[in-house]
Image: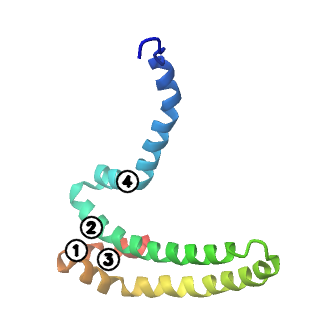
Amino acid sequence: MAGDKYYPAFRLLKEALPFYLESFMMYFRQQGDNWIITMYLGPASLAVYYIAKTLYTSLYMLFQSIDKVFTQKIASHKHDMNYIIDNVPRVMRMVVCTAIPVVLLTMTLTPSLVFLVAGVEYLGSVVPAMICF
């Protein structure tokens, strides 16, 4: 290492700071709601919120998976504009026609789902789970 110049610490910090801020913002975006619930409602409400959020997250992951499958399938035909023009409206119509009934059905089944996921102790999370949807 003789003869190598050291990289100035201040310059390194200056260049790395945006990445640290981005990481913090991503963390706060994912976990910030837990902080807010704990600050305003207290730690006891965090368990109720967690159960409500678990149901929402499960349904959201299902929709994300379906979205990725459709997107990749359509993207595989990027050079065939006729395929895209014919199928994108059909897929959008299918999503619109199924998303609202699925969400309403899930809201209707939420009391049963909360009971299955969390048990009788967390029946207080039924209303927050319905609001999450």
Q: Is residue 75 above or below residue 106?
A: above
Q: Which residue is mark 2?
A: 48
Disc 3 element: helix
Question: Residue at the location (17% across, 75% down)?
Answer: 121
Do the CB atoms of the residues marked 1 and 3 lie less than 8 Å apart? no
Quadrant of the rendered image containing residue 84 = bottom right
Residue at the spot x=41%, y=17% of the render? Answer: 1
Three-letter code for the amino acid on which mark 3 is drawn: Val
Q: Which residue is mark 1?
A: 122
From the viewer's side, name the closer residue of 41 and 9: 9
Which residue matches tag 3?
126
Q: Could you tell me which secondary element the residue under label 4 belongs to?
A: helix
> For the point 62% across and 73% down, which residue is it?
72
Residue type for callout 4 = Gln
Q: Are marks 2 and 4 in contact (CB under 8 Å)?
A: no
Marks 2 and 4, how far apart at CA: 16 Å
